[in-house]
Image (tube, rainbow, N blue to C red):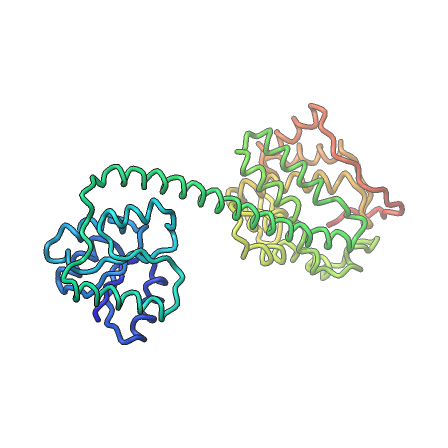
Amino acid sequence: MYVLIVDDDERNRYLLRTQLSAAGMEVAEAAEGAQALACARERRPDVVVSDILMPGMDGFALCREWKADPALAQVPFCFYTANYTESGDRDLALTLGADLFLTKPMSQSDLVSALTEVVERVRREGHTRAPLDIPAEESFREHNVRLLHKMEQQLAELTAANERLHDMVVNTVLAIATLVEARDPYTAGHQERVALLAYTIAGVMDVPDDECDGIRLAGLVHDIGKIYVPLEILSRPSELTAPEFEIIKMHPTVAYNALRGIDFPWPLAEWVHQHHERLDGSGYPQGLRGNQVLAGARILVVADVVEAMTNHRPYKPAVGIDAALAEVREGAGRLYDPAVAEACLALFDQGFTLPAAPAHPGAASVYQR
């Protein structure tokens, strides 16, 4: 028996081909209706097995063309689909003259048996089912309405599933960030405060809402690379040695390597990688200059500097918000993006304040990191 399979999904064709070939059938394949017609006209099959939803000419249109072609009309036409199991779709298939309407999944034996039986019946009776003498246009319109409704449902389900997956990924990353901060009580809440300030600066700059969300998330995870840094270095109340500072300078790259495999809708890993870069090339770890530093990273840079200077660390005392803003003002155009600096300064002029960090007495007088 020679079977023509019509399905745009290569995996479905492979499965059908495997099942039917194992039963001793010869198989040809087509990815859509027009291709199937060309293949059948070149060599007439004993039966055609078609999906419904396909690009170009779908299964219903193929069935109508098939039954209208005198050279193919007596070849049994079978639908085999899991996408459409509503009675209206089955009714339309039969109206168009389909000989079988099978729904997936079917066992190999049941499928082979159904196809064999319909081919033998046609050979025995000398004809296939003819299209009903009913205008198909109304049925097609009803089918299109059902199809649109089904596609809307599937899109809603896919959107919801994507949102759940996105939330799961984000929550996993945030959990890791929380664990990193838990190692060092002096930096507790640092990433949240940086995220809040960066998000608010982005809003002042009229950055699109979606990108603001990405910048906020980048702020929440920008220091996860510090999990690589030994705790005795992070919490030491003294100036770092040169080798120790080299270890510190690796944390943006560690974070980048952890985040780059996650398919965020923003260049979040790159933003995090660049949050210690400076416009004049004096930053780390890449020594980027000017426009090499991405816009989102430029916002993180300023937010990180302001938060770090405003709160105590084991290795430095807080210098206060006025000194932090003076640093931003003096570094604008040289170290920091002038537009970001202006937005940050305007924000605090309008009364913005950062949440207070937990008090940790005994901070040393060294400021270098």
Residue in front for this viewpoint, 188 or 304 = 188
* In the rendered image, the vertical position of residue 316 relative to residue 79, given as above or below: above
Residue at (70%, 58%) from the top-left corner? 227
* In the rendered image, the vertical position of residue 148 relative to residue 369, given as above or below: above
Residue at (79%, 41%) from the top-left corner? 311
Considering the image in quadrants, where does the N terminus appear? bottom left
Numbered disc total: 0
Residue situated furthest top in the rendering: 350
Residue at (21%, 64%) from the top-left corner? 121
Residue situated furthest left in the rendering: 70
Image x and y of residue 260, in percent: 55, 55
Residue in front for this viewpoint, 215 or 73 = 73
Position of 188 with respect to 360 (left or right) is left
Position of 341 with respect to 77 (left or right) is right
Residue situated furthest front in the rendering: 125
Image x and y of residue 282, in percent: 61, 48
Residue in front for this viewpoint, 345 or 224 = 224
Position of 88 with respect to 200 (left or right) is left
Position of 366 with respect to 176 (left or right) is right
Image x and y of residue 247, in percent: 69, 60
* In the rendered image, the vertical position of residue 89 relative to residue 338, given as above or below: below
Image x and y of residue 194, in percent: 68, 41
Residue 213 found in image quarter: top right
